[in-house]
């Protein structure tokens, strides 16, 4: 196992209670207390953006990289600009690096200090991504963590852990599933899961 980019504690990180999050939480509390919104409805909306709408952006990026070698090269060299060319930009997606899985190397993304995450391509971060257990164990025992996600990689596969920062976030480009040569980009994108773009899953399997 090798580690990717690391950061010190002097780097600015998104805090769970940053000013915007605190304002949103306060507003939500007031609206729920006044009976103006249903907490269950909020949960459904959050789940939609966490697992469905948001990750579709990243899936489109991956599908284009699978289909277009020139775009894949551009994504390797300048992921921020390549991703922006597809219209996916915004908060927590300003500086991106794409890391490509191969038969020899599997990439896994974590933010060890908080929960830096590429919202523009993956939507809202899953709860487990922000959990202290994942943030610490992904670095110490990445193979064990992947097994808990149902991903048991061959012993000879190197696992490379990339530590996100407020300045740089990562998108894993999973390996293209076999027997997909005849599929178009939309069909390929449907095979790309959120977890496969974090590194805790494979394309074509798991929860999108």
Image (tube, rainbow, N blue to C red):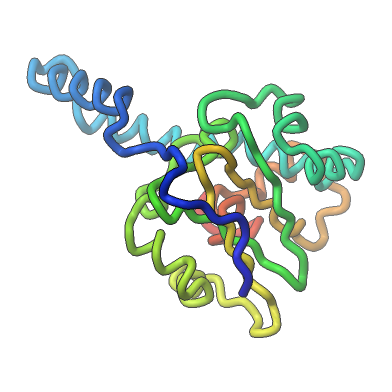
- Give the quadrant of the N terminus: bottom right
| Residue 202 as seen in the image, left or right of residue 166 | right
Look at 58% across and 63% down and name the residue there.
Answer: 161
Which quarter of the picture shows residue 2?
bottom right
Q: Report the front residue among 23 and 41.
A: 23
Query: Farthest residue toward the bottom?
Result: 155
Which quarter of the picture shows residue 205?
bottom right
Look at 16% across and 17% down and name the residue there.
Answer: 31
Instruction: Please provide percent x and percent y for residue 137.
Output: 41, 69
| Residue 127 as seen in the image, left or right of residue 161 | left
Look at 46% across and 73% down and name the residue there.
Answer: 140
Q: Report the front residue among 16 and 46.
A: 16
Reply above or below: 125 against 23: below
Instruction: Please provide percent x and percent y for residue 8.
Output: 47, 52
Number of labels in the image equals 0
Which quarter of the picture shows residue 16?
top left
Query: Farthest residue toward the left?
Result: 33
Query: Farthest residue toward the front?
Result: 10
Reply above or below: 177 against 56: below
| Residue 171 as seen in the image, left or right of residue 46 | right
Instruction: Please provide percent x and percent y for residue 75.
Output: 78, 41
């Amino acid at each position: 196992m090798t580690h990717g980019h690391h950061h010190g504690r002097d780097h600015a990180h998104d805090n769970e209670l940053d000013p915007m999050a605190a304002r949103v939480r306060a507003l939500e509390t007031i609206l729920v207390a006044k009976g103006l919104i249903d907490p269950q409805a909020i949960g459904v909306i959050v789940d939609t953006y966490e697992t469905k709408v948001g990750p579709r952006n990243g899936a489109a990026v991956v599908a284009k990289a699978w289909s277009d070698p020139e775009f894949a090269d551009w994504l390797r060299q300048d992921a921020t600009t390549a991703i922006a060319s597809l219209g996916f930009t915004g908060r927590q997606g300003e500086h991106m690096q794409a890391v490509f899985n191969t038969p020899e190397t599997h990439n896994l993304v974590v933010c060890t200090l908080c929960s830096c995450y590429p919202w523009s391509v993956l939507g809202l971060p899953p709860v487990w991504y922000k959990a202290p257990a994942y943030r610490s164990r992904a670095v110490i025992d990445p193979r064990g963590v992947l097994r808990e996600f149902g991903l048991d990689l061959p012993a000879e596969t190197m696992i490379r852990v990339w530590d996100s920062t407020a300045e740089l976030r990562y998108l894993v480009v999973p390996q293209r599933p076999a027997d997909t040569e005849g599929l178009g980009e939309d069909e390929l994108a449907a095979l790309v899961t959120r977890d496969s773009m974090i590194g805790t899953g494979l394309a074509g399997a798991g929860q999108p």
